[in-house]
Amino acid sequence: MGSAALEILGLVLCLVGWVGLILSCGLPMWQVTAFLDHNIVTAQTTWKGLWMSCVVQSTGHMQCKVYDSVQAARALTVGAVLLALVALFVTLAGAQCTTCVAPGPGKARVALTGGALYALCGLLALVPLCWFANIVVREFYDPAVPMSQKYELGAALYIGWAASALLMCGGGLVCCGAWVCAGRPDLSFPVKYSAPRRPTASGDYDKKNYV
């Protein structure tokens, strides 16, 4: 049960990380208006994300504008989300608690591939997150940028970092579970099958056990 528990725990972490990555990708709060000195009291706040920029008025009214061009950061994030979907199907096929693939070394290799894809997905998601954060921080400390155009790191970046960590940790656990199962088959998920008992001529069930 040890290796199966690792796979299940890893898969749960990966699913939570996948949902977090989707949330981070869709939220427009990758960078938000920095409240500095003269603009500490402002009538509006600007949010910028991968898909759109939004202006939120002090009255609560929000107006958003969708970007026309395709950004590299957006493409990488969407690619990571789609890769996580592929990793989900591969991991489920190779998981010890499913019967999609016959038990054996091949099944463990499938699960190992799924865990590796999840870890790769977490690393891929880190690229646009860190890239975007670096731009925000560099412009924040750049004296040539006007104070009114300075931004801070938004909540979506922190959600994305947490999601990437969960994907990499979960993928690592899935790989560990598959590795343990491949090396120690006795620790795999205990699944036993028995044939149904056949009735005899007298109407009683055959006492012979079938495995």
Image (cartoon, rainbow, N blue to C red):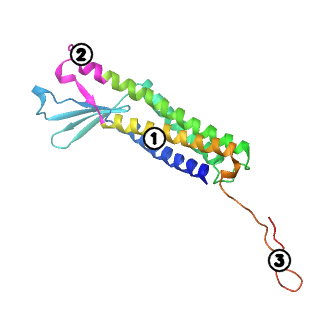
Residue 151 belongs to magenta span: yes
Instruction: Give yes or no for contact between labels 1 and 2 (Cβ–Cβ under 8 Å).
Output: no
> What's the distance in space between the residues labelled 1 and 3, CA to CA?
51 Å
In front: mark 1 or mark 3? 3
Instruction: Give yes or no for contact between labels 2 and 3 (Cβ–Cβ under 8 Å).
Output: no
- Residue 59: give x, y in percent of width and height: 15, 43
Give the amino acid at mark 2.
Asp
Local secondary structure at mark 3: loop
Give the amino acid at mark 3.
Lys
Local secondary structure at mark 1: helix
Q: Which residue is mark 3?
A: 207
Numbered label attached to residue 142: 2
In front: mark 1 or mark 2? 1
Magenta part of the chain = 136-154
The answer to whether residue 44 is seen in the rendering is: yes
Numbered label attached to residue 166: 1
- Residue 205: give x, y in percent of width and height: 82, 80
The quarter of the rendered structure image containing the N terminus is: bottom right
Query: How dense is the environment of label 3, judged by Cα within 10 Å: few (below 14), some, or many (20 and up)?
Result: few
